[in-house]
């Protein structure tokens, strides 16, 4: 690894640790410098702002997630419908093994209403997943398990729908983290979404799963605990 890449990675590691320890808002660039013992010039050589650091941290998390997905889609022995289920799950903020990262995104994008980070996440999802979605739809059409005259366009449409549904779910959950009725409402929305995906993709009824209610509740509870911790730090 080049020295510059190593230093860049060290800055990202230190910043991410600080964001989780004391909150994004309360972490200053000077805090990051102090953690690493470097000068402002050493920071600004690689990054122009704290938000840029956050975006690259997000990019690192998402890149690993998308690399694993690509491996499953193009080398795994899954059916096209199974691949579609797996791919559309990636649009969910809670489809992660890192509840602290989900909580940070939930706070910034849906509690603090940071439109820039929220839009950035959507752009990354579209950029990384659109071709995969088109390939999965085309594969399903060839197999006869999915049906669409324009598989690539339907694949992109399904991604857009997935992101809109995730936005609505996160908005509902972020509004009242201690209200269990919110989760019931989200599950209702997701069930309608699942049926919509079946209709748009031409998949057989009941073959699109997209989410496991028990796993979703568990992931939400973990993210909520981390969110409460973050807000306790920043309160």
Image (cartoon, rainbow, N blue to C red):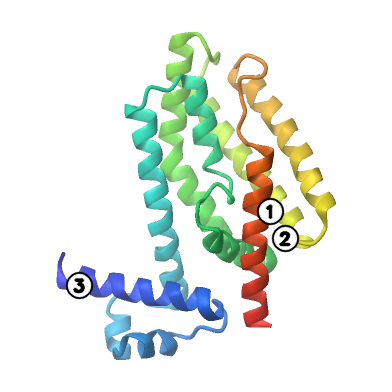
Q: Is residue 149 above or below residue 159?
A: above
Q: On the image, which quarter does residue 3 sit in?
A: bottom left
Q: Quadrant of the N terminus?
A: bottom left
Q: State the mark number for residue 97.
A: none
In the image, taking residue 104 as reference, residue 142 lies left or right, namely left
Q: Are marks 1 and 2 in contact (CB under 8 Å)?
A: yes
Q: Helix or strand or loop: what does disc 2 sit on?
A: helix
Other-residue count near label 2 (Cα within 10 Å), few / some / many at <14 / 14–19 / ≥20: many
Residue underneath mark 3? 4
Find residue 85 and report its horizontal and vertical position in percent.
Answer: 54, 30
Q: On the image, which quarter does residue 118 sit in?
A: bottom right
Q: Helix or strand or loop: what does disc 1 sit on?
A: helix
Q: Is residue 75 above or below residue 50?
A: above
Q: Does any portion of residue 62 appear in the rendered image? A: yes
Q: Nearer the viewer, mark 2 or mark 3?
A: 2
Q: Are marks 3 and 1 in contact (CB under 8 Å)?
A: no
Find residue 104 and report its horizontal and vertical position in percent.
Answer: 57, 66
Q: Does any portion of residue 114 appear in the rendered image? A: no
Q: Helix or strand or loop: what does disc 3 sit on?
A: helix
Residue underneath mark 2? 174
Q: State the mark number for residue 170.
A: 1
In the image, taking residue 87 as reference, residue 227 lies left or right, namely right
Residue at x 68%, y 53% (from the top left corner)? 170
Other-residue count near label 1 (Cα within 10 Å), few / some / many at <14 / 14–19 / ≥20: many
């Amino acid at each position: 690894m080049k020295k510059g890449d190593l230093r860049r990675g060290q800055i990202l590691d230190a910043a991410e640790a600080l964001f989780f320890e004391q909150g994004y808002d309360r972490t200053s660039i000077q805090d990051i410098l102090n953690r690493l013992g470097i000068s402002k010039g050493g920071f600004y050589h690689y990054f122009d702002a704290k938000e840029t650091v956050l975006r690259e941290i997000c990019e690192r998390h998402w890149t690993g997630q998308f690399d694993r997905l690509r491996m499953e889609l193009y080398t795994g022995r899954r059916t096209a419908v199974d691949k579609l289920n797996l791919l559309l799950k990636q649009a969910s903020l809670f489809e992660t093994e890192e509840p602290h990262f989900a909580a940070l995104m939930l706070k910034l994008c849906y509690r603090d209403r940071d439109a820039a980070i929220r839009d950035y996440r959507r752009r990354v999802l579209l950029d990384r997943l659109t071709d995969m979605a088109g390939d999965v739809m085309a594969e399903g059409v060839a197999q006869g398990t999915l049906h669409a005259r324009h598989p690539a366009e339907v694949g992109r449409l399904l991604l857009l729908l997935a992101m809109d549904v995730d936005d609505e779910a996160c908005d509902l959950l972020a509004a009242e983290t201690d209200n269990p009725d919110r989760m019931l409402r989200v599950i209702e929305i997701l069930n309608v979404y699942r049926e919509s995906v079946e209709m748009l993709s031409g998949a057989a009824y009941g073959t699109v799963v997209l989410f496991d209610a028990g796993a979703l509740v568990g992931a939400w509870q973990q993210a909520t605990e981390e969110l409460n911790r973050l807000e306790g730090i920043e309160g």
